[in-house]
Amino acid sequence: MINAIIVDDEPLAHQVLLHHIKEYSDINVVEQFTSPVNALSWLAKNKTDLIFLDINMPLLNGIDLLKVLTNRPQVVIVSAYQEYAIEGFELDVTDYLLKPTSAERLSVALDKVRQRHALQLNITSNIEARESETHDNFIVLKVNREKRKFEFDHIDYIEAYGNYVKVWDGSQMVLVNSTLKRVLAELPEALFTQVHKSYVVARSRVSAIDQEGLSLSNGIKIKIGKSFRQKALNIL
């Protein structure tokens, strides 16, 4: 899913874009702004993957808005004027559409957006993979903006939490900037086993197992997923 916002002082321009965008299930318009100042305020506190941006607007034009953004998302300029195209591309916008926007031209722009989005996801994934380091007795994972060491002996289980994971040590939990799949790939199979799409357990912490779930030595009970049952039953 690619989250987007529309910044255009003309309400009709919003309607035209929304009419075309509704045909694409992977584009999600999360906010709309007729004021570029309000849009800039929102962007200071929130993130988006894509901005559909007009140029000629009161108080702050689209080019100036782009120049003050520090973490700039992808931008598709939608303008009635051609003369800003060169400056727009110098600011690395993904595409430049002329009003009135046609469905065909928007489709081409969205293909470019998807290509850049996929490339960025791949780059981010590679960076995170390099930031996860495995050692004989511990793993190093990213927590917020710092790297932190987690000793294998202190991990009871790991729980998926969207694009994060929760690493549990008894009743203590640390939220890690990674996915369960990525962390699992860095863990030694002899010590950890995935027993559910959302859970990886430390084998040494498992005290009892039946067909439905398993119990850890600290009393925590974890459900076993059907596709992971055989692996789970082989822990003991």
Image: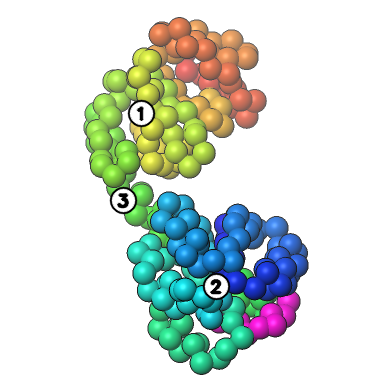
Q: How busy is the neighbourhood of tag 1: few (under 14 within 10 Å), some, or many (20 plus)?
A: few
Q: Is residue 215 above or below residue 147?
A: above
At 41% from the left and 42% from the top, the residue drawn is 178
Q: Is residue 236 above or below residue 116?
A: above
Q: How busy is the neighbourhood of tag 2: few (under 14 within 10 Å), some, or many (20 plus)?
A: many
**Image coords of residue 213 (percent x, y):** 58, 14
Disc 1 target residue: 174
At 38% from the left and 41% from the top, the residue drawn is 177
Q: Nearer the viewer, mark 3 or mark 1?
A: 1
What SS does tag 3 mark? helix
Q: Earlier in the sequence, mark 3 or mark 1?
A: 3
The numbered dot on residue 150 is none
Q: Which residues are magenta?
A: 94-104
Q: Amino acid at mark 2?
A: Leu
Q: How busy is the neighbourhood of tag 3: few (under 14 within 10 Å), some, or many (20 plus)?
A: few
Disc 3 target residue: 130
Determine whether, in the image, residue 187 is placed left or right of residue 133: right
Of the pair 222 and 107, the residue shown nearer to us: 107
- The answer to which image quadrant residue 41 occupies is bottom left
| Magenta stretch holds residue 101 | yes
Q: Amino acid at mark 1?
A: Val
Q: Is residue 117 visible?
A: no
**Image coords of residue 11 (percent x, y):** 68, 69
Q: Nearer the viewer, mark 2 or mark 1?
A: 2
Q: Residue furthest bottom?
A: 83
Q: CA distance from mark 3 to mark 1?
A: 20 Å
**Image coords of residue 97 (percent x, y):** 60, 82
